[in-house]
Image: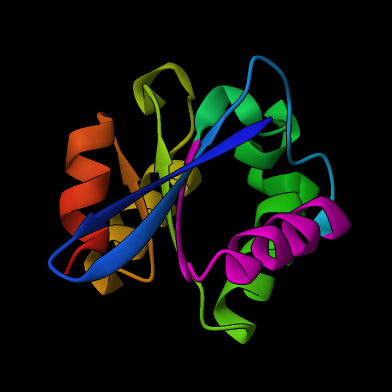
C-alpha cells in the first residue's frame, strides 16, 4: 500500500494506492486513519476494490461500523468505484444520503473525489 498526498484548495488529501484489499475490518480503517493523520491528512480517498466486498452488503453491518469510525474521528472519506454493479435499494439509498452530507462520499472518479474533499 502506498499513500499519495495531493493538496487542493489548501487541503491535504491522501489517496490510498494498492493492488489489494486494504480495509477488511474496523481496525484496518483505524490504522489507515492513523497513517494518514500522521502525514497531516484528515481527508482520504480509497478505491472500492481496496475494501472488502462485504462492505457493500449493508446487511453485514461492516460499512456502518467502519464509517462510524471515520465520523467519530472527523475524517472525511471518498470511496471511488463503479457502484451500479452492487444491487439493492438500501445501498443506493445509503450512497445518496452519504453524498448529500459529504463527510463520506461515493464517486466514480478520483478527480470527482478530490473535488468533493477539497471543499
What residue lies at 48% left-to-right and 25% top-to-bottom?
Answer: 87
| Residue 17 in which image quadrant | top right
Residue 49 image position (x, y, % from top left) = 58, 22
Q: Quadrant of the C terminus?
A: bottom left
Residue 116 image position (x, y, % from top left) = 20, 57
Magenta stretch? 27-46
| Residue 103 in which image quadrant | bottom left
Left/right placement of residue 119 relative to residue 40 reads: left
Main SS class of the magenta portion in the image: helix
What residue lies at 74% left-to-right and 41% top-to-bottom?
Answer: 23
- Is 43 in the magenta? yes
Please say which color scheme the image uses.
rainbow
| Residue 99 in which image quadrant | bottom left
Give the residue at the far front of this rendering.
39
Residue 69 image position (x, y, % from top left) = 68, 73
Left/right placement of residue 99 relative to residue 119 reads: right
106 or 85, nearer to the observer: 106
What residue lies at 69% left-to-right and 30% top-to-bottom?
Answer: 1
Task: Give above or below for 70 relative to 25.
Answer: below
Label total for image = 0
71 or 15, nearer to the observer: 15
19 or 41, nearer to the observer: 41
- Is 97 in the magenta? no
Residue 7 image position (x, y, % from top left) = 25, 57
Amino acid at each position: 500500500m502506498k499513500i499519495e498526498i495531493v493538496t487542493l484548495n489548501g487541503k491535504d488529501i491522501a489517496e490510498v494506492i494498492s493492488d489489494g484489499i486494504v480495509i477488511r475490518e474496523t481496525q484496518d480503517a483505524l490504522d489507515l486513519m492513523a497513517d494518514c493523520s500522521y502525514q497531516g491528512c484528515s481527508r482520504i480517498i480509497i478505491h472500492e476494490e481496496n475494501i472488502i466486498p462485504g462492505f457493500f452488503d449493508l446487511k453485514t453491518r461492516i460499512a456502518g461500523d467502519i464509517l462510524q469510525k471515520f465520523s467519530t474521528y472527523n475524517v472525511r472519506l471518498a470511496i471511488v468505484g463503479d457502484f451500479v454493479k452492487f444491487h439493492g435499494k438500501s445501498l443506493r439509498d445509503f450512497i445518496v444520503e452519504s453524498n448529500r452530507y459529504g463527510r463520506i462520499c461515493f464517486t466514480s472518479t478520483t478527480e470527482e473525489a478530490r473535488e468533493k474533499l477539497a471543499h
